[in-house]
Each structure stands twice: as C-alpha cells, then as structure tokens.
Image (cartoon, rainbow, N blue to C red):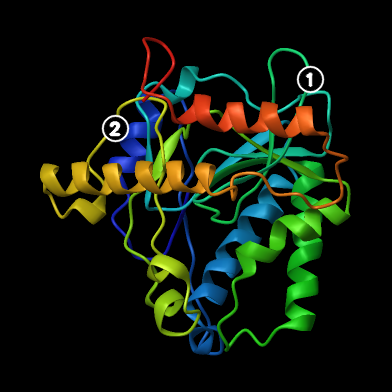
C-alpha cells in the first residue's frame, strides 16, 4: 500500500479481513523531490513498489491509499490469463477502453486504462515498469506536470505486456482528485474518476462522500451513466491497429460492454 501522510487504517483493516495483509510503504521525499509536481512524486512511490515487486514471486497487488475495496475481494476470480507471463491487471480502471476480447471461457478483457489506484504485476512486468521510470526520468521534467499513468500502458505494451481488467471493478477510487489535473492538465471532469460499476458493496464509505450516503449515491449514479454514455458513443472500443478487429469482434466487444454495465444479478456484481 502506497501512502505519504494519509490515514490508511480503514484500508489496512479491510485488506487484512480479505486475507490480503498489506505492507505499508510511506514514502519520504528529499528537498529536491519536494519541488517535483505532485503527480511526479506519486510516480516515485510507485517506482519503489515496482522495485519490491521485481524481487517477489507470483503477482503483487499494489494500491494507493485512497483505494476502497469491494467486500469479498479476497475471493474474486483472477481476471487475466495466467499463461501469459507479461499479463497484468487493473482492479480499478477509471474510464477503461476495450482493445480486444479473448475467445473462449472465461473471456478476458484486454484494455487500456490509466489510474494506478489498484493493480497487480508480476516480476517481469515490474521490471518493464522500472524501465518506464528510467525512460520518464530521461524524457520529462519531474518539476512539471505530466500524466505519467496515461503513458505507462503504451510503454509496457511496446515491451510485450498486456493489461486486463475484471468485468466489474474490484474496488473504487475513494479519494479527491489531484488539483493539478484540473489546474494544469485540463483533464475532463477535473481529473475526477470513479468506477462505472462495482463487483460488490464497498468495505467502507469513500473519502469523496465526506460522510454523506446521499453524496455516495449521487456519485455512483453519475459515473454509471458516464459509463453507459461511453459505451453508446463508441468510446468503449479503442481500435489501436494492434488487433485486427472484425465486425463480429466489435459486436462481441460492444455486448461485453453492455453486459458489464447491466443491473446486478445475484453473484455477478452491481
């Protein structure tokens, strides 16, 4: 779990109860690093996690302090093909785009997503991410704002990596948006992003609700509608040219998008 000065006890408790005990990584910054943009400082924290994951067997779950997991997370299914040594996955995806849908069962969602709120990597992918950090260090001025998480997946993809996501988010982005996203990045929604669906109820009320259940329901409804709008406007499917998508493929991908946003049925999510 990545943190700076945030209160992380609710998340630590939730993960422990899901049989996913987390080690807390509180970063400290040098005076030089304190002059970096907030987004760049976040990248430094992820870099430390990648260094640890590169030395570990199997997959490592990395999450930021504002991740709010769904109840039952510890029992949710693996959503990436375990036969692919360069597969990795986003438990939470922000505003995902579907690149391809695998054949057979289960059907895996090959996606592009940006936020690194909660994701899983193995040692192979972690080493590729460390290569990305070296690339970003040589390419960008860390004192200036840049959306490092948007570029990451294309870099990993260029190295043979493939990102996947579950059919429903395994948790929510519970925090408030980095003010740089709106003030400098001019991002849509001011950099705010949330899940368009959830696999199950959340473990605790997110920070963005400010303790209000009504605000929680408003935000959840808003982002469900934005997800539906993304599907109907054609932005759910992203044609990169990497995959040769037939008309039938695109129909399957559209139906997959509709299925993941459908009202919850018992055992499927919400």
x and y percentages locating residue 87 in the rendered image: 77, 37
Nearest to the observer: residue 6 or residue 228: 228
Residue 55 disc label: none
From the viewer's perspective, is 258 left or right of 171? Answer: right
Asked if the residues shown at circle 2 and circle 1 are in contact, with their CB atoms under 8 angstroms apart, the answer is no
How far apart are the alpha carbons under marks 2 and 1?
A: 33 Å
Q: How many marks?
A: 2
Q: Residue at x 82, y 44 (%)?
A: 124
Q: Position of residue 188 (x, y in %)?
A: 45, 68
Q: Which numbered mark, 2 or 1, is in the foreground of this view?
A: 1
Whichever of labels 2 and 1 marks the residue nearer the N terminus, that label is 1
Q: Nearer the viewer, residue 224 or 117?
A: 224
Residue at the outermost top position: 266
Report helix, strand or loop for mark 2.
Answer: loop
**Residue at 75% across, 45% down:** 55
Tag on residue 203? 2
**68 lies above or below 103:** below
Circle 1 SS class: loop
Q: Which residue is mark 1?
A: 103
């Amino acid at each position: 779990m990545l943190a700076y000065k945030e209160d992380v006890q609710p998340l630590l408790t939730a993960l422990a109860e899901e049989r996913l005990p987390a080690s807390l990584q509180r970063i400290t910054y040098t005076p030089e690093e304190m002059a970096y943009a907030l987004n760049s400082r976040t990248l430094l924290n992820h870099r430390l996690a990648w260094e640890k994951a590169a030395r570990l067997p199997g997959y490592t779950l990395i999450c930021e302090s504002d991740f709010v997991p769904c109840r039952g997370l510890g029992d949710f299914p693996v959503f990436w093909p375990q036969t692919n040594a360069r597969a990795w996955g986003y438990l939470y995806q922000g505003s995902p785009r579907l690149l391809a849908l695998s054949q057979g069962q289960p059907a895996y969602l090959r996606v592009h997503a940006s936020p690194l709120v909660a994701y899983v990597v193995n040692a192979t992918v972690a080493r590729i991410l460390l290569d990305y950090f070296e690339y970003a260090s040589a390419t960008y001025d860390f004192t200036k704002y840049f959306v490092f998480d948007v570029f990451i997946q294309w870099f990993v993809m260029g190295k043979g990596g493939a990102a996947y996501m579950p059919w429903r988010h395994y948790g929510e982005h519970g925090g408030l948006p980095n003010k740089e996203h709106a003030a400098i990045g001019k991002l849509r929604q001011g950099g705010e992003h949330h899940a368009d669906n959830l696999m199950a109820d959340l473990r605790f009320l997110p920070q963005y609700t400010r303790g209000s259940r009504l605000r929680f329901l408003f935000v959840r409804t808003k982002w469900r509608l934005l997800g539906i709008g993304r599907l109907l406007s054609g932005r759910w499917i992203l044609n990169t040219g990497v995959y040769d998508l037939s008309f039938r493929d695109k129909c399957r991908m559209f139906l997959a998008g509709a299925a993941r946003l459908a009202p919850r049925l018992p055992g499927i999510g919400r």
